[in-house]
Image: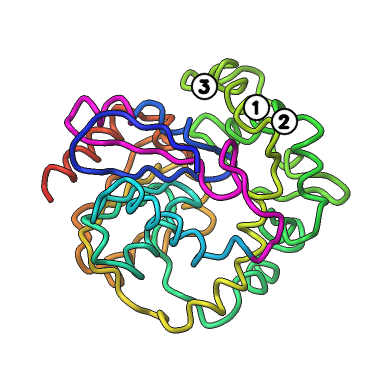
Amino acid sequence: MHVAEAGSGPLVLLLHGFPECWYSWRHQLVALAEAGYHAVAPDQRGYARTGGPAEVDQYTIHHLVGDAVGLIDALGEDQAVIAGHDWGAPVAWHTAQFRPERVRGVIGLSVPHRPRSSRPPIQAMREMFGEGFYMVHFQQPDVPEESFDRDPAGAFRRTLYAASGDGPALLPLVPEGGGFADASPEPDKLPGWLTEDDIAAYVAEYEGSGFSGPINWYRNMDRNWELTAAWHRAPITPPALYIGGDRDPVVAHQARKAVDRLADFVPNLRDTVWLSGCGHWTQQERPAEVTEAMIGFLGSL
């Protein structure tokens, strides 16, 4: 597992989402180190320099939580605060749920904890949003990877812009015969928080590993639902913080009710922080505000 790390002190794991890598935490790595913490941002299973197995069933939530716990062990620690953004958030929430004795605190960015539903999630999303919804589209073998492989820079540019507070905040629907990148418009110019150098950095980090591993996370959503039956409606007990953008399409289209009811299933929720005008890429769009909220929470533990 490839990690980027900075500083020394209490351990803080920073888990990225899709389609990102350790680089999405570039601002927090420095700031947390300066505040007296050991900040560690891995490339998670299947991503960038870590890479991963070819088999789809090797990307379940149990594998991903196991990776997080294994990383805590490899770093010589008994516990960590785990922060997760986008897909990293469910890994963080589930690590706190499955192994609370290893988690001093949990921070979810963009994606709140959602209690296990009464039926498989892909079926529900297919009925609600249709075949073009990107999570449903990602269930196909091989096809979803093609639009990323064809033009990685364009895919990153479109995706990072479209879901940001500067973008259109659209529900990502893949047009028939198109690819994931086609669900997002090409920006006339990049927002102020994103540069062409940032896009080039993402492209370089993915070179050689491709996108099958990351998309395999989505291909396990129904399998995860089956595997987590024993934790149906189980609470998450460690201290918790949620940070979200009020222009995040994930919140607007899918998760606002889960945010509003978060304390029902996360009884030690310390705070919910809303970032005005911020979209999906919280720690990149608003690095100073996110870091301030994280350090305040860390200091309270």
Q: Write the start and end of the magenta stretch as one range.
A: 29-57
Residue occupying the point 35% across, 38% down: 40
Residue 110 x, y percent position in the rendering: 42, 48
> What residue sits right under mark 3 in the picture?
194
Mark 2–mark 1 distance (CA, rounded to whole Å): 6 Å
Task: Residue under label 2, please give it.
Answer: 152
| Labels 2 and 1: the sequence-earlier one | 2
Q: Point out the residue furthest to the right here.
A: 177
Image quadrant in which you'd find residue 199: top right
Separation of residues labelled 2 and 3 (CA atoms): 16 Å
Q: Amino acid at mark 3?
A: Leu
Left or right: 279 as drawn, with respect to 14: right
- Measuring from the top left, give residue 109's x and y in whole percent: 38, 47
In this view, 272 is above or below 294 = below
What residue sits 65% from the left and 69% below the top? 122
Check disc 1 and report its element: helix, strand or loop.
Answer: helix
Instruction: Give yes or no for residue 156 being in the magenta stretch.
Output: no
Q: Are marks 2 and 1 in contact (CB under 8 Å)?
A: yes
